[in-house]
Structure formats: structure tokens, C-alpha cells
Image: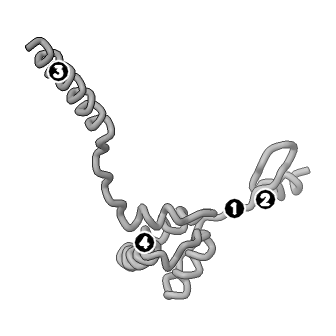
Amino acid sequence: MEEDVDLKLLEQRKMEALRRKLKASAQPPQAEKTDRQVVEGALYDRGDEVLDAAYSFYPNETERLVKELAGMIRDGRLAEKIAGGELLSIFRQLGLRFRLKTSIKVMDQGKLVDLSERFRRKEES
């Protein structure tokens, strides 16, 4: 009789340990990434700036292109990272032209300054 009680107690402890282990290992399901998140993950070298600028100038067309690119990335047809220049070239080939804010910075007295400011300083001195 006493063995049955000990056995049941041991069984309950093991079941509780298994429940805790199962609960700890159960992870919440991960939400599927949006098309934009998939494409942003494949961008480098100012690609995010190009994408943001494209969305501000051509939101509908950019959304369609992002959907296509995300599909290609998910299917494995596009395994390489996309540079900002390449993405800008894709938009231009589609006839979607827009400007990006660019600046050229040079070292002057240990600081990075715009090239135009460096020329102004030279003219003043």
C-alpha cells in the first residue's frame, strides 16, 4: 500500500517536471514578416534610404516592386543582398526617377565636413 502512494507521488513529480519543461520549450508562434521587412533584410549600402525615398515619391509602384522582390527572396530566386545603387537602378529602369540627398564629406583638421564648406573656408582664407 505504501509503495503505491510513493509511486503515485513520484509519478506526479515527474509529470509536473515534464509539464514545466514543455511549457518552457513552447515558444510563441513567430509572426510572418511583411514583404517590406523581407526586402529591408536583404538591403545594404544605403538601400534602406533608397527604399524610403521611393515610398515617399511612388508609394503604389514601390509597394508592387517590394511585393515582387519579397516573393523572389522567399522563393530563393534572389539569394544575394541588394545594394542601394542596384535598387536605385531598378527603379530607374522602371521609369521611376527620384533624387536622394547626397553629400560628399572630406577630412578637414581632423573633422568630417561637407566639401562645399571646405571650399568656402579656402575662399575665405
Query: Which residue is the site of mark 1?
Result: 103
Asked if residue 53 shows in the view, the reply is: yes
Earlier-in-chain disc, 3 versus 2:
3
Whole-percent x, y for residue 78 in the image: 52, 76
Whole-percent x, y for residue 87 in the image: 56, 75
Between the residue at mark 2 and the residue at mark 4, the CA separation in whole angstroms equals 42 Å
In the displayed structure image, the side of residue 38 where residue 10 appears, left or right: left
Q: Is residue 11 above or below residue 121?
A: above
Residue type pointed to by label 4: Arg
Q: Answer few, some or many: residues within 10 Å of disc 1's Cα (few below 14, many 20 plus, some between 14 and 19).
A: few
In the displayed structure image, the side of residue 73 where residue 47 appears, left or right: right
Between the residue at mark 1 and the residue at mark 2, the CA separation in whole angstroms equals 8 Å
Query: Which residue is the site of mark 3?
Result: 7
Earlier-in-chain disc, 2 versus 4:
4
Dots 1 and 2: beta carbons under 8 Å? yes
Question: Which of labels 3 and 1 is toward the front?
Answer: 3
Question: Which of labels 3 and 2 is toward the front?
Answer: 3
Earlier-in-chain disc, 3 versus 1:
3
Which mark is drawn over residue 74? 4
Between the residue at mark 3 and the residue at mark 1, the CA separation in whole angstroms equals 76 Å
